[in-house]
Image: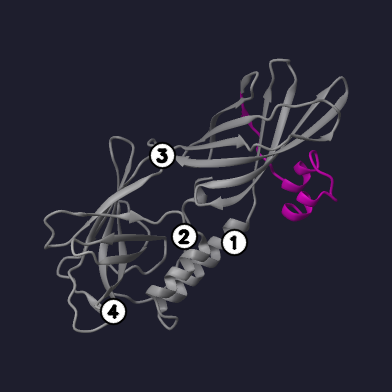
Amino acid sequence: MKKLFFLIFLYSFSFLFSQAKNVQYIDFVDFTDTSGVQYNVMMVTDKHEEDGRADSTIRILYTTDGNEHLVEFYADCYYEKLKNGNTKISFIPIENGSVQIIKGKDISYNPDTFIYEVDSKTGKIAGTQSDKNSTTPNPLVYKSAMSIQDKQNQTDKFYFRTEAMYSLLKSFYNKKTDDINKPYFDAVGWFGGDGIAYQAFIISVFKDDNNLNSIVRIRYETNGEIHIVEYDALSKIALQGDDTINISIVPKNTPVKIIKGSSGYNADSFSLTLDANDEFLRGKQSDENSSADLSYIKISNNQEFALKFYSEKDAVYQKYLK
């Protein structure tokens, strides 16, 4: 699952040192200065090196006296894990770097420093902007709840279609869209307090950056009869302070459908912990009556395994597995 967070796109272009050459991360933030002027910011960041530094290109869009201005400068982006488990991201303008005026005239601009922190438990992001003339940093508004289409629309405000970076960004968004539409499959098993062996097959697709919509099917056998039930769930992904990944799968407030068999069923919640290499470490199943330890089932053939839960004519099978 960790690969969901890190998408790598390699290109060969000749740019100045500290300008982002590839698109690894994109950030959008807003801030307002003491005079009331609002600034929109787009950061394009390359891959972080082992020392935590990455090349970054920053563009600032703002309006004064009815005139729109767009400026650009380069920054070193530093990634740092803090002792409290949070992540600190710092964009520091390169030493002796200049600001390029992309749009507008008769303006001057001092490169900004941006520092923000990502809470490891809640995912909330808070930070500040400052420049060489700042006495008190301005708070940032980090725009995290943006769809891919929203980000593409924003990019059109910062970059012209004829620029090389625009082509890089277009490829980045296309790959991101492919990953969003791509289903992810998980399978887990456990023994209930009744001694029955249960298996769950979970199909997930992106809802937004850290959440997935999931379809859960459970298969089990009682007295020689196979039972299969289905329900919808929301899966949330969180990177922990120790670099493990927690995936929590919580049923939505929808009925449990009986696909095969006749017994009723209480929808399960699941919690999975993976290491930095996507290897399963531990997991728990729980419902309103019980809980159990999970085992992770490695699937070598998605279609073949899914046929334990779906027929080939099932709409979900046709959409995600055919």
- Residue beneath label 2, please? 8
Task: Rate crowding at label 2 as few (under 14), some (14 to 19) or many (20 or more) other CA atoms within 10 Å.
Answer: few
Disc nearest the viewer among 2 and 3 = 3
Label 4 vs 2, first from the N-terminus: 2
In the image, is 105 to the left or to the right of 57? left
**Residue at x-position 62% and y-position 58%:** 181
SS type, badge 2: loop
Q: Quick one: 66 or 80, which is closer to the camera?
A: 66
Report, in whole angstroms, how far the alpha carbon at label 4 lies from the one at label 3: 39 Å
Task: Rate crowding at label 3 as few (under 14), some (14 to 19) or many (20 or more) other CA atoms within 10 Å.
Answer: few
Disc nearest the viewer among 1 and 2 = 1
Instruction: Give amino acid for label 4.
Output: Gly
- Residue beneath label 3, please? 122
Label 2 vs 3, first from the N-terminus: 2
Mark number for residue 66? 4
Residues drawn in magenta:
293-322
**Residue at x-position 28% and y-position 50%:** 127
**Residue at x-position 37% and y-position 36%:** 241
In the image, is 106 to the left or to the right of 87? left
Report, in whole angstroms, how far the alpha carbon at label 1 lies from the one at label 3: 27 Å
Label 4 vs 3, first from the N-terminus: 4
Quarter holding the C terminus is bottom right
